[in-house]
Amino acid sequence: MFRAVASRGVSRNLAMTQPVSRRFPTPAIASLPVDIRTRILAVQEKSGFVPNVFLTLAWRPEEFRAFFAYHDALMDKEGGLTKAEREMIVVATSSANQCHYCVIAHGAILRIRAKNPQIADQVAINYRKADITPRQRAMLDFAMKVSAEAHRISEQDFAEIAGHGFSDDDIWDIAAISAFFALSNRMANVTDMRPNDEFYMMGRLPK
Amino acid sequence: MFRAVASRGVSRNLAMTQPVSRRFPTPAIASLPVDIRTRILAVQEKSGFVPNVFLTLAWRPEEFRAFFAYHDALMDKEGGLTKAEREMIVVATSSANQCHYCVIAHGAILRIRAKNPQIADQVAINYRKADITPRQRAMLDFAMKVSAEAHRISEQDFAEIAGHGFSDDDIWDIAAISAFFALSNRMANVTDMRPNDEFYMMGRLPK
Amino acid sequence: MFRAVASRGVSRNLAMTQPVSRRFPTPAIASLPVDIRTRILAVQEKSGFVPNVFLTLAWRPEEFRAFFAYHDALMDKEGGLTKAEREMIVVATSSANQCHYCVIAHGAILRIRAKNPQIADQVAINYRKADITPRQRAMLDFAMKVSAEAHRISEQDFAEIAGHGFSDDDIWDIAAISAFFALSNRMANVTDMRPNDEFYMMGRLPK
Amino acid sequence: MFRAVASRGVSRNLAMTQPVSRRFPTPAIASLPVDIRTRILAVQEKSGFVPNVFLTLAWRPEEFRAFFAYHDALMDKEGGLTKAEREMIVVATSSANQCHYCVIAHGAILRIRAKNPQIADQVAINYRKADITPRQRAMLDFAMKVSAEAHRISEQDFAEIAGHGFSDDDIWDIAAISAFFALSNRMANVTDMRPNDEFYMMGRLPK
Amino acid sequence: MFRAVASRGVSRNLAMTQPVSRRFPTPAIASLPVDIRTRILAVQEKSGFVPNVFLTLAWRPEEFRAFFAYHDALMDKEGGLTKAEREMIVVATSSANQCHYCVIAHGAILRIRAKNPQIADQVAINYRKADITPRQRAMLDFAMKVSAEAHRISEQDFAEIAGHGFSDDDIWDIAAISAFFALSNRMANVTDMRPNDEFYMMGRLPK
Amino acid sequence: MFRAVASRGVSRNLAMTQPVSRRFPTPAIASLPVDIRTRILAVQEKSGFVPNVFLTLAWRPEEFRAFFAYHDALMDKEGGLTKAEREMIVVATSSANQCHYCVIAHGAILRIRAKNPQIADQVAINYRKADITPRQRAMLDFAMKVSAEAHRISEQDFAEIAGHGFSDDDIWDIAAISAFFALSNRMANVTDMRPNDEFYMMGRLPK
């Protein structure tokens, strides 16, 4: 019963004038393997819509599974970084990579997780001027270097970030989130993945 | 029985003077979840040694699983690209990212898959001068643009590569391999992952 | 009578915890020459707040007058470019220059002028993927080249943009807006000029 | 009477084989608003020729007025920087922007103001090797960073330049001159504005 | 007899307050091998002064000999390029490399060989705007690509330059001059070689 | 007698399917001036083959002589740098310049001189991660800066490298080798000079 409703919701979404991806075909929900369909419907149930990244990547079920397993391992993890801080890394590096989908979608999540309607725009435009703590600034400096020139990461970079109280575990997280979205940004840019309209306003108004 | 022998092999490997990663701890094989240990031992059985990427990433079992699932989905796939061509993409983009581990390790695999002892060095140094076909050159041009500036990939880039006979499926593969190693290169550079000594000579001599 | 009220409004604004500029002193409204004070109060009357660019630049009355005279000559002009298109140029080039103030403030104006709540974020992140016409895309290609490497603008660039129907007058406007915000972005970045809170939500909700 | 003579001089200038701008029309002096015509004739009276920037920008009277008001506010100002130092900023940043007109014209002014026939060429080619004081070197380091990457100007940059004895007022001047010529260089490059022949030799010979 | 006089001239030159190189010792003329001393005195006899490149490089006699043999083979050669055109290549590429010595010294030679007092400044600042022929523009486009990114020189670049009538011999000359000054610029920059005062005015006044 | 044999060897070499240079004609050995022919035959006698750089550059005998005189003065010199260290500079800078010939050929020489089969690949891919001493790392940092941005070499760079015990003579050597291969890399890239097959395996196996 629920699935039927949900599927209709998805279909409606797919019937929009704006495509999910402008460059690759989007599979029909009904055609997807059950685990992927279940995940998509669960997201829809929770969010009220299906973020286009799910529909675009579903064209390749195996890659879809690996992508979201990796994503969840990094972004839903407990640890020294808050969930808002993890999203800051995503927004800052995705903006440097000019990734339309990732900045809009993760900007929304950042606003919600940080309970701050301005933070995503600030981090996206120039994180050096954002209203963040010096520790968060050091975190983003490291993440941005991993994103742009990981081959130059040196002992000095490790010493600096450790000096802000980040553990080895935290540093791995910062690097891995930056690295994972290096992948994600490229896929979104190549597929010309369109951010859902819903993301633009999420977290901008007080609840 | 086999496991005990294999484990000893791994331990010996770990006891080398050269570390696996210079920046993060390498877990003991015995401490790893069974699926990861099994995968590592299988690789050792096949290759005669454990490539350091397995030991470095095993520090994070969930990420390990997602990483290799993603890797296998892209690199062991049948399709319009040969396995050697997939490795060419890895070597060219990893060299642009100055990734020590990936160029050495995948250079070895490329030599073997292409049955060509010179191809990896050529592709790594300047793929524009390598002994490859015009179609492979177009494939690498696209892959390199995804790697370096995916935000500029345009309809014209799609038209050019399609003009060389690559299907939508092939183009996704090219982009996804480039994107996946954008992640991989960054992790290898941040962890200062060391290529195993065995890779340097693999595929350089006729069998 | 009105001025007294307005001044109080300004003072309240200035008393916020967030500074107008983090690097240079902000003059008291009462201390400003009458023409500048009048302009500031007029803006406040119209907008409901004083955009921080007015307060920051008022430290230098002569430069203030020249700056806004230049701005108005380019942005309030009738001509072949709509006002929304002029703001697109500002948002695209200011984002490339990572100018916090200009992207937030002119993003707001762009949303209002284009009556489109998504356009500013799209143009800021990657104008190549924004929902704009091919003519607007050509306009932004030219503007971005003026912003980033005007020394390479060639006859071919002129031919291409003229091919989209832009007149000499329009091309001058595109170039001059891009050039003016090259100045403006640098001043905003050096002064660490803070965008007013009001800009973030302007034009995001239907009236 | 004087005006008639001056106008003739200007016409002769316009009749040269070399155009003032290769891309936009140059207005006839007689057609210009009286304030602009007066300014142009005054410059001619003083210099013996009309610098092409006046003729090129006169196509747009409002922008002309704002441009020169801004220019004069920054360049003719008294303050912590000498007039020669202000011109050094122009020459260094205009050379980095490969602005033909600005390097030649302001190189001439720099030679005259510094009473030094070599300084302009030195500052244009590589200011790090010019015969200038450490304080001037710090001034140009700051100006060049504003010109090339103002979004990275940090507290450390402010501390360094303040350490050379520059006041807040001086730092604003340095930044504003660099920012103003970011605009000016772009306009000169887009219009392909030609430096007058007279500039090349000015200040090269002892008076 | 002549030598004694000449030597005195050189000594006077060396006694100037400005050093020849700010970073390496300058050998005494008398201490140099006879062939090098002879060459230096011949240059002095012809030019009236000893260009500092001779004194700086004389610290290493073998390299001195190879350097000037290479230089002469390329610059004094007859062929499809005029001597002025050869100097244009030097000035354009040396300016891109911000080489103080080479731009000033070869700018002087270019003015003399082209009998044009403006050409060197134009080519140094932005050769795309210089008063040169389309063929010379194509020559400099090729030379600049060799200088900045020779690894991207492609068949298309060869086709374009050949289309302007350059022979294989000419193309080699263009490339080799650009390559030789890649060496020369780096040596001059590292040694902080100072251009002689005489160069600044050479070729600027009609004879 | 010997010459005939040698010449035949060279001819066989020239008759290979792979050209020596893909862009310029390769002269016949017999047609070369005797000194050049003698040098080439001596190299062949010693190495067992004629490295293609000799055949490519022999098209221009005067440049050939200057090139190898310069090369020998820098690379065969005794001094503070070992011969292996000199080759490290060549490999690191040639890799940054994406020079196919130089990385392959000098990589071989580096392996032999350092008696280390891995060092060349390590230095080529990312010298910051190579198994070298801190002193060698400082040497390569300096060499790479000379190669990429010699105009920014500063007193601080000199102080740092001198702090590792390099003398003025050594620093000149480092700079001059980097500068010489700036020339060499450009010539090899423009001529599309092909590395001989023999280089790929040299020094990879224990003798």
Image (cartoon, coloured by chain):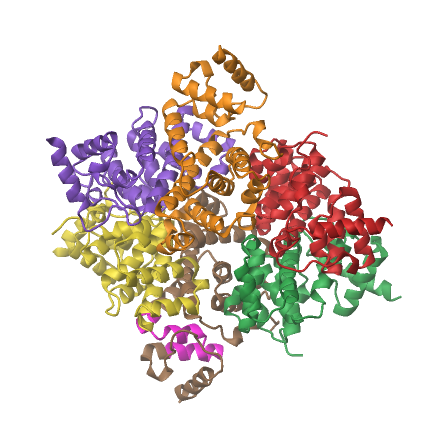
Chain colours: A yellow, B brown, C purple, D orange, E red, F green
Residue C168, image x, y percentages:
43, 24
- The prevailing secondary structure element of the residues shown in magenta is helix
From the image, which quarter does the N terminus of chain B lie in? bottom left
Identify which residue, D86 or C50, lies in the foreground: D86
Quadrant in the rendering for residue E200: top right
Does residue F201 appear in the picture of this structure? no
Q: Is residue A121 magenta?
A: no
Furthest residue in direction right, as rendered: F1
Outermost residue on the top side: it is D1
User: Picture coordinates of residue C91 (x, y %)?
Assistant: 32, 40
Task: Give me the residue at 34% from left, 44% from top.
Answer: C95
Q: Residue at x 33, y 83 (%)?
A: B31
- Asked whether, in this view, residue A88 is left or right of residue C168, the answer is left
The C terminus of chain B, quarter of image: bottom right
Above-or-below relation of A126 to F6? above
Q: Is residue A43 above or below residue C46?
A: below
Part of the protein shown in magenta: B38-65
- Horizontal side of A179 relative to F32 (left or right) equals left
Percent position of residue B24, x then y: 38, 74
Q: Position of residue A2 (x, y in %)?
A: 13, 56
Q: Nearer the viewer, residue E150 or B71?
A: E150
Magenta-colored stretch includes residue B43: yes
